[in-house]
Image (spheres, helix red, strand yellow):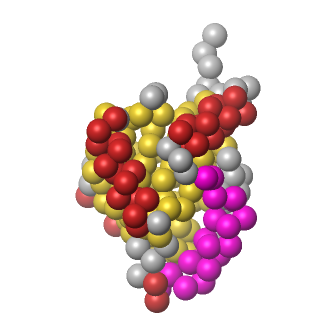
């Protein structure tokens, strides 16, 4: 039987610049370094969470079901060559989507105790740590609990989703002046 592991489970927190630096230092000592990335993401207008992103490695179309900052969401990604990013943007604009937000992020990714850990510096938004694992629908709560325990091991308190939602709404209204 094939198990569909298409649910992204995430625990995230805003951190201070000092905590950000300590996390990087800790991860460099205790985790497997995966990659150093710079990402440009365009969020498109509409009822659904549809984005395109260009990283140092590829471009992608990215769709997430549910609400932004939910604990777990079904995720679909289609990767293409990074050189085709502008074609993606033009395709969606031609289809009537408007760029609602532009997002510029430096991301360090590690694998720590079987968990994907990203340490992010997003221009105009802040420093964020994310712990992530893919799951099936049946086990998403178990995976979420595992990730919250791992965040506590890092001595970081999970930021409530309402704080993320409020900060995201502020960024959405002000991103042009924040970047």
Estimate the x, y position of residue 154 in percent, counting from the top left: 50, 44
Secondary structure character of the magenta stretch overall: helix
Q: Nearer the viewer, residue 88 or 147?
A: 147
Q: Is residue 129 above or below residue 152?
A: below
Foreground: 151 or 88? 151
Q: Quadrant of the C terminus?
A: bottom left
Q: Is residue 117 visible?
A: yes
User: Would residue 143 be found to the left or right of residue 138 on screen?
Assistant: left
51 versus 148 height, above or below: below
| Residue at image point 56% right, 33% down | 134
Whether residue 89 is in magenta: the answer is no
Residue 35 in picture, x, y percent from top left: 29, 45
> Looking at the rendering, which quadrant does residue 33 occupy?
top left
Q: Is residue 58 visible?
A: no
Q: Which residue of the protein is positioned furthest toward the bottom in this rendering? A: 177
Q: Quadrant of the N terminus?
A: top right
Q: Is residue 48 above or below residue 28?
A: below
Is 126 rendered above or below residue 155?
below
Q: What is the span of residues highlighted in magenta in the rendered image? A: 157-176
């Amino acid at each position: 039987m094939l198990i569909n592991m298409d649910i992204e489970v995430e625990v995230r927190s805003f951190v201070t610049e000092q905590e950000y630096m300590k996390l990087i230092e800790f991860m460099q000592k205790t985790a497997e370094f995966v990659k150093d990335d710079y990402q440009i993401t365009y969020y498109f207008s509409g009822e659904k969470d549809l984005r395109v992103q260009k990283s140092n490695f590829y471009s992608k179309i990215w769709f997430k079901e549910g609400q932004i900052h939910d604990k777990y969401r079904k995720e679909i990604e289609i990767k293409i060559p990074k050189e085709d990013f502008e074609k993606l943007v033009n395709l969606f604009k031609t289809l009537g989507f408007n760029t609602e937000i532009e997002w510029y992020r430096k991301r360090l990714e590690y694998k720590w105790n079987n968990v994907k850990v990203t340490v992010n510096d997003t221009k105009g938004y802040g420093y964020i740590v994310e712990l992530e694992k893919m799951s099936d629908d049946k086990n998403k709560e178990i995976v979420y609990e595992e990730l919250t325990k791992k965040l506590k091991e890092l001595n970081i308190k999970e930021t409530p989703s309402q704080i993320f939602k409020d900060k995201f709404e502020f960024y959405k209204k002000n991103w042009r002046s924040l970047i």
